[in-house]
Image (cartoon, rainbow, N blue to C red):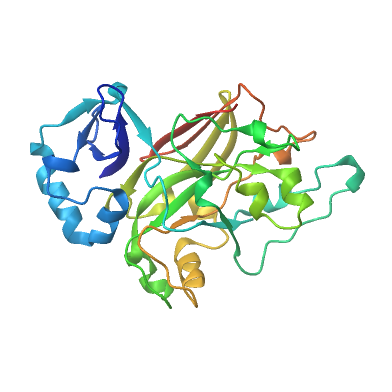
Amino acid sequence: MRLVTFRKTKGNDRAPCLGVIPDGRSEVVQISGRYLRAPGSMLALIAGGAEALRVVRMNTPHLPARYHLAEVELLAPIPVPPRNILCIGKNYREHVGEVRFIEPSDGDPQPAEPPAHPMVFTKATTAVIGPGAQIPAYLDDTDSTDYEGELAVVIGKGGRGIAPADAMTHVFGYTIVNDVTARRLQKRHGQWFLGKSLDGYCPMGPAIVTADEIPDPTVLKVRTRVNGELRQEGCVADLIFDIPTLIATLSRGMTLQPGDVIATGTPAGVGMGFDPPRFLRSGDEVKITIEPIGTLRNPVG
């Protein structure tokens, strides 16, 4: 299923709703509220586990509340995650190779080696915005806002000490994240949190596709376009640390929770990797496509 969080653009009811986009249809079926005795939010649906999904699957074809996609505003599937987005840095070999100093005064770039262990950082939940929302690059006083298209894993069943062999049973589904980054701010502070956590610097969506619809995520392709120009194209099979390894590593001493979002890393082609760098500017548009999840589109302001 393609699960979305949306709100209606007509009428007085602007409260977020939970919905399903049926395959091949340009409509969203509302599954929350009076139409179905199902959880009213994405986090509640995730926490409801297999039984909640079964109820939704069984009843969605018969529900009356249907809206054309032009009549709704898609929000981030999880508008307010339960805690910071868990992110993995330098997880594609070609991206490791393109990471370099961004100032001429820094001198010649030094060869970069792939990390020996997953590089983990987080993004604040206040950075999350939905499809179509503006990336507020004007908040970056260093004028170095960059894009990073990524496949994101949504945890369903929580746990600690999860073995790699069991890791995929803990996956609820998959979505897209743009790990927007203020590069010079990232460098200025000697850590990554501030440069990656500006308000609006974590576009997410347009949907969560449940894990049963993507039995093998390694075949997925990540494509990022800026103003229609293809900048990134990578395959999830090329991750240095695959999804089971990431889940096992994160859960080794920390309990993963239902609704946790893990951004798995970005392929080569980020703006920082060009000479000179090609950072985002007001008026640009970033589109990240991972089928069958869809396309996450955001203008830059």
Q: Is residue 267 left or right of residue 14?
A: right
Q: Is residue 197 left or right of residue 130?
A: right
- Asked where in the image residue 49 lies, by quadrant, the reply is bottom left
Residue 270 coordinates in the image, percent (x, y): 65, 40
Q: Nearer the viewer, residue 285 or 211?
A: 285
Residue 287, image x, y percentages: 51, 31
The percent position of residue 221, horizontal first and vertical second, equals 47, 43
Left or right: 134 as drawn, with respect to 273: left
Q: What residue is shown at x 72% (from left), y 41% (from top)?
A: 273
Between 235 and 152, which is closer to the camera in this rendering? 152
| Residue 169 in picture, x, y percent from top left | 32, 66
Quarter the N terminus occupies: top left
Q: Is residue 255 left or right of residue 97?
A: left
Q: Is residue 135 visible?
A: yes
Whether residue 211 is visible, yes or no, is no
Q: Residue at x 45, y 44 (%)?
A: 176
**Depicted 180 relative to depicted 284: above or below:** below
The residue drawn where x is 71% and y is 58% is 191
- Please determine whether, in this image, residue 110 is positioned above or below residue 222: below
Instruction: Say how many tags the image has.
Output: 0
Residue at horizontal 15 percent and vertical 54 percent from the top: 54
Farthest left residue in view? 62
- Name the image quarter holding the C terminus: top right
